[in-house]
Amino acid sequence: MSIHIQVQTDDFNVGDEHNTLCSNNKSDGAVVTFTGLVREFSSGDNVIALELEHYPGMTEQLLQSIAEQAQTRWQLARICIIHRVGYLALGEQIVFVGVTSRHRQAAFEGAQFIMDYLKNHATFWKKEHFKDSSNWVEFKQSDKQALGKWES
Amino acid sequence: MAVGSEINPNDAISSAGKVELLFFGQLKERLKCSKLSLEISQPLTISELKLRLVSQYPHWQPWLEERELLAALNQTMSSSDEIVKAGDELAFFPPVTGG
């Protein structure tokens, strides 16, 4: 079992990450990846960029712990989590989660679990930049509710 | 002589020292401060430490008393009754919004 965690300012290549998850991997029949992007519309205004900051050290530990929790619940041989920080323009990639498993259900659920936990626990803060202003993003209750499905 | 039972005057001194404080996200912007070394003379709870900060920086009060404010002691999420000692790292921040 392997876990790869990376917090970086640089962009990532989904194809490369996908290849890494698949290479020399004869036992897994499923790969699920999720990529989060900077989107245009938030609370009405046009977002032109996002600014992301994090708590260096704590963030990596939390992501590692989320990945380990996922591996205790599902048979996920490989997990890769990449999260970008800094100034990200519209359309840019923010986050990547990729997991491999023997079968698709564990891979789908594992990837979703990781994203739900990341949204609620990983120490990142997002600021939206508009044409003439900026605004810190508020925590969404819907993200908290998303955890409910894993708590049974 | 029961030497061990005597109060060691160094005990009080050894519990004094600095706590490294960190602030993130909107809180950092509001306080106009990302980090701060705070001298403490003895261990105190996170809420007591907040009161210390408020007495030292009264204009921080509304932000430090925000109900949703979170704290992490030595990079572990912590409740306000946990004890902070010299040499600890204590971070305050709003709810997280990554992903």
Image: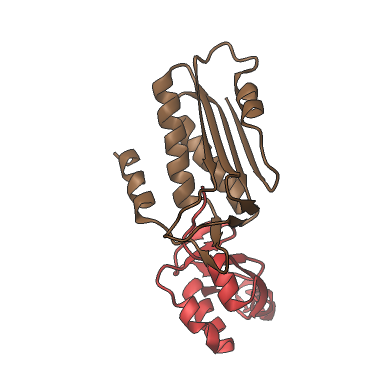
Q: Where is residue B10 in the image (x, y as percent from the top left)?
A: 69, 78
Q: Is residue B43 above or below residue B59?
A: above
What's the coloring here? by chain
Residue A108 visible in the current orientation: yes
Q: Is residue A54 above or below residue A7?
A: below
Quarter the C terminus of chain A occupies: top left
| Closer to us: A49 or A138 | A49
Residue that appears at 49% across and 46% down: A118
Residue that appears at 39% across and 56% down: A140
| Closer to us: A119 or A40 | A40
Q: Colour of chain A?
A: brown
Chain identifier matching the red colour in the rendered picture? B
When asked about the image quadrant of residue A138, the answer is bottom left
| Closer to us: A15 or A105 | A15
Q: In this view, does B18 lie above or below A121?
A: below
When asked about the image quadrant of residue B8, the answer is bottom right
Quarter the N terminus of chain A occupies: top right
When asked about the image quadrant of residue A93, the answer is top right
Residue that appears at 40% across and 72% down: B67
Q: In this view, does A58 lie above or below B42?
A: above
